[in-house]
């Protein structure tokens, strides 16, 4: 069990996308593992917390909600500032929300001060497939062009909700470890070279063999 008061890493996660795509409900479903049938376009939830463990680290995930600011095109800089990871969300039943994905990607990349912030593209409301207006391959293409992962989720059936967060947490964690310990990859390289040295006869040994065979 993670002690909620003690953690040694903190990741800020933001969700952006048009109003009504399901950002608030994705967070709620992740935290509570259930869908609130009565939810309207939600206002209220500010920051949700989740605690996870990775290797020896206790991590606090802070999931920020826009609180509906996107409806008035008024997302504050404070929202993007310090974000360690982002979900860009559209609604698979709404072509318009998919068209706006490019703008949201641009907003995240230009406003998040964290360089190369990990982003995952989400096509939400996969439970409404009978009402689909954005084909899966369109989402896949957009993600490929932007070199980011892509998942279709449902805050309703919970499909891929945990997977989306797990994947983003993995990316944020790997990035953090690389930043904290840039030498790690070189250490591995040295070990690899040592192994090579053991297996490969030295020049002298080869010369010796040649001379005396
Ligand atoms: P936000 O404005 O992006 O935060 O969107 P909300 O989370 O407030 O959701 C907007 C509406 O879509 C609400 O009526 C939700 O109940 C509904 N909704 C959100 N996610 C899903 C989903 O995965 N499936 C279905 N069927 N409805 C959803
Ligand atoms: Mg909302």
Image (cartoon, rainbow, N blue to C red):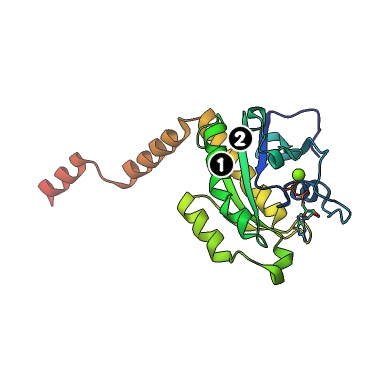
Q: Which residue is mark 1?
A: 118
Instruction: For marks 2 and 1, give the CA distance.
Output: 7 Å
**Residue 129 at x, y = what percent?**
69, 69
Percent across and percent down for residue 12 are 67, 34
Taking the image as drawn, is residue 117 in sight? no
User: Circle 1 — which element?
Assistant: loop
The quadrant where residue 153 appears: bottom right
The part of the image, by quadrant, that contains residue 14 is: top right
Q: Position of residue 34 (x, y in %)?
A: 84, 54
Residue beneath label 2, please? 84
Dot 1: few (<14), some (14–19), or many (≥20) neighbours within 10 Å? many
Q: x, y (%) of residue 179?
A: 52, 30
Question: Which secondary structure, mark 2?
Answer: loop
Residue placed at 65% from the left, 61% from the top?
92
Please state the quadrant of the image where ligand 2 appears. Answer: top right
Pointers 2 and 1 in contact (C-beta within 8 Å): yes
Above or below, 134 relative to 55: below
Q: Quadrant of the N terminus?
A: top right
């Amino acid at each position: 069990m993670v002690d909620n008061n003690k953690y040694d890493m903190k990741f800020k996660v933001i969700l952006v996308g048009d109003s009504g795509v399901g950002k608030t409900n994705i967070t709620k479903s992740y935290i509570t593992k259930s869908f609130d049938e009565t939810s309207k376009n939600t206002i209220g939830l500010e920051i949700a917390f989740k605690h996870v463990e990775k290797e020896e680290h206790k991590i606090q995930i802070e999931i920020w909600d826009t609180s509906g600011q996107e409806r008035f095109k008024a997302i504050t800089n404070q929202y993007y500032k310090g974000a360690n990871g982002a979900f860009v969300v559209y609604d698979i039943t709404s072509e318009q929300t998919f068209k706006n994905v490019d703008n949201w990607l641009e907003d995240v990349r230009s406003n998040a001060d964290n360089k190369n912030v990990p982003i995952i593209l989400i096509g939400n409301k996969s439970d409404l497939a009978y009402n689909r207006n954005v084909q899966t391959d369109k989402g896949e293409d957009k993600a490929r062009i932007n070199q980011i992962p892509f998942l279709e989720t449902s805050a309703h059936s919970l499909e891929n909700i945990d997977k989306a967060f797990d994947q983003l947490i993995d990316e944020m964690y790997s990035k953090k470890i690389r930043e904290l310990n840039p030498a790690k990859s070189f250490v591995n390289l040295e070990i690899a070279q040592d192994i090579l040295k053991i297996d490969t006869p030295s020049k002298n040994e080869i010369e010796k063999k040649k001379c005396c065979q």
